[in-house]
Image (cartoon, helix red, strand yellow):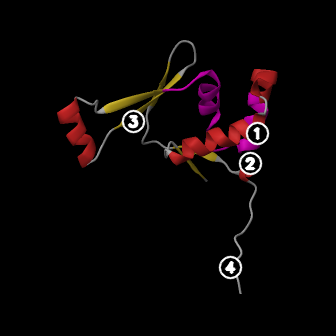
Amino acid sequence: MKNKKKSENYLLKVPNKNPSFPFSQDENGIVTLEVENKGAMNRVFQKLFKKPKISYIHLDEMGSFIWLLIDGEKDIIKIGEEVKEHFKEKAEPLYERLSKYIKILESYSFITFK
């Protein structure tokens, strides 16, 4: 008997910000994430190559807007509706772009799912 993986709709997932990554927002609404470079290899690079202890990840306008919508309550569909309302046609193809962006945030552990 084969193990069947339960199929779930990715767009119904509820993203939540990882509190390990503090962020700030400038006067234009652009979000900057702070990533602490930890671990033995990072310490070596910091000493030898003067690499920073904290890296700053600057999100673009749409990425910042989406980041601020991630609250642990809204699923990806609801986030997409707000993105569409705010950015209109500029957001298209909406759910393809949004799901890719959410997957990137998840791959760097910036978000988790409930």
Q: Is residue 5 left or right of residue 60?
A: right
Outermost residue to the top: 27
Residue 71: image quadrant is top right
The N terminus sits in image quarter: bottom right
Separation of marks 4 and 2 at Cα, in angstroms: 24 Å
Q: Who comes first in sequence, dot 2 or dot 1?
A: 2
Amino acid type shown at disc 2:
Leu
Residue assigned mark 1: 95
Q: Toward the viewer: 45 or 60? A: 45
> Residue drawn 50% across and 16% down?
26
> Residue drawn 46% across and 42% down?
19
Q: Who comes first in sequence, dot 4 or dot 2?
A: 4
The stretch of residues the image draws in magenta is: 58-83
Task: Point out which mark residue 3 bears.
Answer: 4
Residue assigned mark 2: 11
Outermost residue to the front: 49
Cβ atoms at labels 2 and 1 below 8 Å apart: yes
Separation of marks 2 and 1 at Cα, in angstroms: 8 Å
Amino acid type shown at disc 4:
Asn
Q: Who comes first in sequence, dot 1 or dot 3?
A: 3
**SS for dot 2:** helix
Residue 61 within the magenta-colored segment of the rendering = yes
Cβ atoms at labels 1 and 3 below 8 Å apart: no
Residue assigned mark 3: 35
